[in-house]
Image (cartoon, coloured by chain):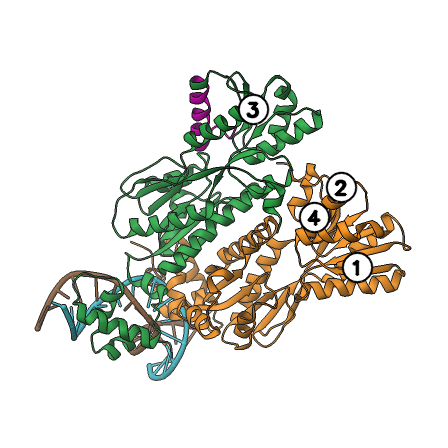
Chain colours: A green, B orange, C cyan, D brown
Amino acid sequence: MVVTIRDVAKRAGVAVSTVSKVINKYPSVSEDTIARVNKAIEELHFIPNSVAASLSSKQSGRVAVITDPDGQTLASSEIMMQYIMGAVKAGNEARIDVIPLFFSMLKGMTVEEIEHRLEVQNIRSIIMCGLDNDMEVLLDLVKREKFKNVLVDMPMVDENTSNIGVDHAQAQKDILRKTITENEGPSASVLYISGRTNSYVTEERVRGAKELAEELGYKLTIVDGAFSEKKAREITLEYGRNHDIIACGSDLMAIGAMKALTDMNIFHPVCGFDGITLMGYTGKNMNTVRQNFMEIGEEALREAYRLMTGETGRSIKVPYNLVHIRYEDVLA
Amino acid sequence: MVVTIRDVAKRAGVAVSTVSKVINKYPSVSEDTIARVNKAIEELHFIPNSVAASLSSKQSGRVAVITDPDGQTLASSEIMMQYIMGAVKAGNEARIDVIPLFFSMLKGMTVEEIEHRLEVQNIRSIIMCGLDNDMEVLLDLVKREKFKNVLVDMPMVDENTSNIGVDHAQAQKDILRKTITENEGPSASVLYISGRTNSYVTEERVRGAKELAEELGYKLTIVDGAFSEKKAREITLEYGRNHDIIACGSDLMAIGAMKALTDMNIFHPVCGFDGITLMGYTGKNMNTVRQNFMEIGEEALREAYRLMTGETGRSIKVPYNLVHIRYEDVLA
DNA sequence: TTGTAGGCGTTATCAT
DNA sequence: ATGATAACGCCTACAA
């Protein structure tokens, strides 16, 4: 009824184990049998059952994608969706099961519980997206080295752990330099509204802003906006008047800042970070760093696969673009 | 190493099959052994391996959630994310694997191919969200009755198929009535910008608008906006001047219409449909129907489970709210 | 290089 | 009401 590896073996005139070896690209199979087996696979439209595979093998397993879109902001929902889509897409191509998990489901569980839970689900690798240092359980989980980990926007690397993301410091420098040169020039006074302080990306972006300040010699004031649109708004209402340029550690904060400026009836250039669609709805043409979240999701899945096949962890930088998003760009 | 059903059996002093029966709530087990087994399960922190279960059982399997966020609009990405989160959450509680799929991955495949693909993935049930009649393959898939189907916002029902969603006609009437009475009163001339014509929800919403027009006696002009923000904008630029109220078949179109009015420097009340966060960024206080997409996702998963346990298809209506979303509401 | 056979953790079918 | 045991589809020593 359903075509199995046995049918393929019979058709190709070989043993099931040989078929398995072909499927999993074992080296020790002759070109000749590879061809015969592949022919049989074609003819029978055989698709390996990934459930059976992950049950039997501790090598090829399933990968969980953990996100936390529960800030419930539009931005995070868009970004997390892209991560998940990318991972699912790449997983589909590689015939790897991708299991989405949300941080809210894990909250309150101990590391052991989470680990156990994932283990019995035959999960062998975890992709973590958009998490910050608050989520200690997850960091512990990584450290226990039970799984292969791919961390998006977190610095750790070890035997079983890779990380992936853009170069946040460099990107921050780039977008800030662009905004400054397009406007006030190096003499500008810059208000930097930073993201959550316990997050790696914030540290990096702040570092970038500082480095550029030294390089160009502008005056830099850093205030903690905690990735909150509301907070960015309040900060801008308080300090916005005394600065020439407002740089934000996220688009959402940039939007909050810009709205505040509008309400104050003054104008300063504002730049953000992420490149979310929502930026197009402000009608303000703000500069921002566009990250390709879907591409990152895909790459993360591929990296998970790489780790599962025994390769060792590494650090991956992905490209970004400097853009400004206009209403026309997001209008469908 | 990992606690299995065997360990539980040993501990409880029964056979593995008995443990399985307890787990799956078979009727033919004595209260006494049920208690003993549950005690052992507790003590050993046993969690059943759902992968093994779905391999072995053709009864209890995994459920796929198919969405299509590829319109790439902010609205759909928010909505689809909610559906997926809901399903994953409910699946997590019921220990059912939820596999997200995206329509783009299925595009170009024949029904047979899709069916086959899902089958070998041990998928027994499919939840389809936000699809319209264009996606004929998927409708064919439903008709073939190989899987249990839960359709969000599509009318079909049969032995293996349930549908779920709000009462779109009623909701459209409600929100329109509210908007009219708050403003011009029954003598108003209403411009209705409808969604894609081949979609069930559009039909229903249009029906609601028409019924209310008869009831209240207002003048109703219906124009096809195809769920497009851009099209709604163009329509409004062309016809907006001659109407008192603009009702739209989606929030996105409402936003497009409102932006057009603003550009024309005139004001008419605009109402939308869906209740997406983006509405808060327009600063216009538009009325809309808020659907609880996450709740719908959860309910859909539970319904899928119900169907998989042999129950027969049915139609489920979920509640909605009439709201207007302000910037303060979405500010985090 | 290829084949044999014993798992992987559950469920389901028969006996008992 | 309970227990043995053969699947489910694949992977992987180990043997040939």
Q: Nearer the viewer, mark 4 or mark 1?
A: 4
Mark 4 vs mark 3, CA separation in Å: 31 Å
Q: Nearer the viewer, residue A122 or B8?
A: A122
Q: Amino acid at mark 3?
A: Asn
User: Are circles 3 and 2 on residues that touch, CB within 8 Å?
Assistant: no
Q: Which residue is mark 1?
A: B173
Q: Residues within 10 Å of mark 4 (few under 14, many from 20)?
A: many
Q: Residues within 10 Å of mark 3 (few under 14, many from 20)?
A: some
SS for dot 1 = helix
Q: Which residue is mark 2?
A: B262
User: Are circles 3 and 1 on residues that touch, CB within 8 Å?
Assistant: no
Dot 4: chain letter:
B
The answer to whether residue A109 of the structure is visible from this angle is yes
Q: Residues within 10 Å of mark 2 (few under 14, many from 20)?
A: few
Image point (60%, 35%), residue name: A285
Q: Nearer the viewer, mark 4 or mark 3?
A: 3
Q: Which residue is mark 4?
A: B256
**Of the numbered discs in the image, which one, if any, rests on residue A183?**
3
Q: Residue A144, located in which quarter of the rendered image?
A: top left
Q: Nearer the viewer, residue B172 or B43?
A: B172
Q: Report the predominant secondary structure element of the magenta stretch.
A: helix
Q: Amino acid at mark 2?
A: Thr
Span of residues in magenta: A193-214
Mark 3 vs mark 2, CA separation in Å: 29 Å
